[in-house]
Image: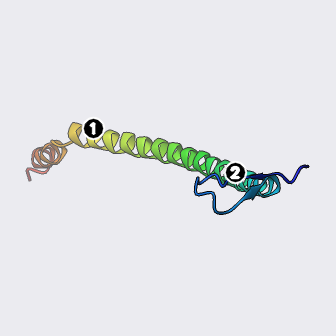
Amino acid sequence: MSMKTKKNPSGNGNSPVTQVDLSLWGGRLQEQIIGLDQRMDGLDKRMDGLDQRMDSLERGQATILQVVQSIDQQLREHKDLPARVARLERSVFRG
């Protein structure tokens, strides 16, 4: 590898940058990118897990809602039951 000196990419020309410097900088940048990519993969897996848990919670909530609606319907069907029982007791136990 040649040790040619190039102008500083910032344009001020005060600090010469060699190909070795650029190669080292590029290597460090590549390591950082790989590290970030691995972190993103980990976050993707965590998000998938959260998505599955949310789906499970939604199914549970839907089941609970169905049970509550069923109970509500049954209560509506039998709301006149106390009055019917009282009327039946009066007619049976006229005494």
CA–CA distance in space, label 1 to label 2: 59 Å
Q: Is residue 3 left or right of residue 82?
A: right
Between 47 and 35, the one lying in front of the other is 35
Between 1 and 53, the one lying in front of the other is 1
Between 75 and 81, the one lying in front of the other is 75
In this figure, which residue is indicated by the disc labeled 2?
A: 33
In this figure, which residue is indicated by the disc labeled 1?
A: 73
Label total for image: 2
Q: Position of residue 56 (x, y in %)?
A: 53, 45
Query: Which quadrant of the view contains residue 76?
Result: top left
Q: Nearer the viewer, mark 1 or mark 2?
A: 2
Residue at left offset 56%, top offset 50%: 50
Bin the neighbour count of mark 2 within 10 Å (Cα to Cα): few under 14, some 14-19, many 20 and up. few
Please state which amino acid type lies under the numbered disc 1: Gln
Q: Position of residue 95 (x, y in %)?
A: 8, 53
Residue at left offset 23%, top offset 36%: 77
| Residue placed furthest toward the right | 1
Q: Is residue 78 left or right of residue 63?
A: left
Under tag 2, what secondary structure?
Answer: helix
Please state which amino acid type lies under the numbered disc 2: Ile
Residue at left offset 82%, top offset 56%: 20
Q: Is residue 86 left or right of residue 66?
A: left
